[in-house]
Amino acid sequence: ADYNQLGFNLRSNIFQGGPLESRSLMKDSYTPDIIQKAVRDPKNWHGRRTDELGKWHQKNALNLNLQKALEDKYG
């Protein structure tokens, strides 16, 4: 009975999903000139600097991709 009720609700589109227009708390809280003046620094992401471990993981991922590409090309 529950399965049939769920199937009926899905077929009749009672569950229509989320809103089509999303809202941002930052855009609602600040004026547009503040958002345009904001400078995004990739090394200082959300107040956190990239540390040595993060740099190592980034280099390691590049190295693994390079090794895979070389193996694919040369066998």
Image (tube, rainbow, N blue to C red):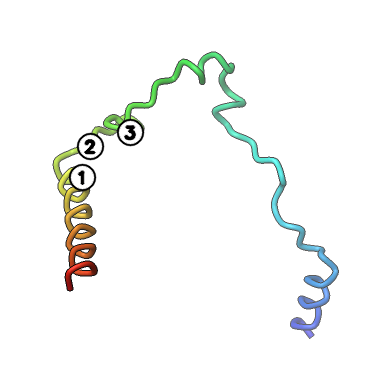
Marks 3/1: CA–CA distance? 12 Å
Instruction: Find numbered disc 2 in the image and state the secondary structure of the residue it sits on.
Output: loop
Category of crowding for the residue at label 1, using alpha-carbon neighbours closer than 10 angstroms: few (below 14), some (14–19), many (at least 20): few
Quadrant of the image occupied by residue 40: top left
Cα–Cα gap, marks 1 and 2: 6 Å
Left or right, 39 with respect to 61, comes to right
Which residue reaches farthest bottom?
1
Q: Position of residue 66 (x, y in %)?
A: 20, 57
Q: Amino acid at mark 2?
A: Thr
Sequence-first disc among 3 and 1: 3
Name the amino acid, label 1.
Gly
Q: Which mark is residue 45?
A: 3
* Quarter assignment of residue 33: top right
Q: Position of residue 36 (x, y in %)?
A: 50, 18
22 up-or-down from 40: above or below: below
- Residue ID at (70%, 41%): 21
**Label 3 secondary element:** strand
Instruction: Assess whether mark 2 and mark 1 are in contact (beta carbons under 8 angstroms).
Output: yes
Query: Residue at 81% of width from left, 65% of height from top?
Result: 13
Q: CA distance from mark 2 to mark 3?
A: 8 Å
- Marks 2 and 3, the one that precedes in the sequence: 3
Pointer 2 with pointer 3, Cβ within 8 A: yes
For label 1, the residue is 54
Q: Pointer 2: what residue?
A: 50
55 left or right, relative to 46: left
Q: Residue at x 81, y 63 (%)?
A: 14
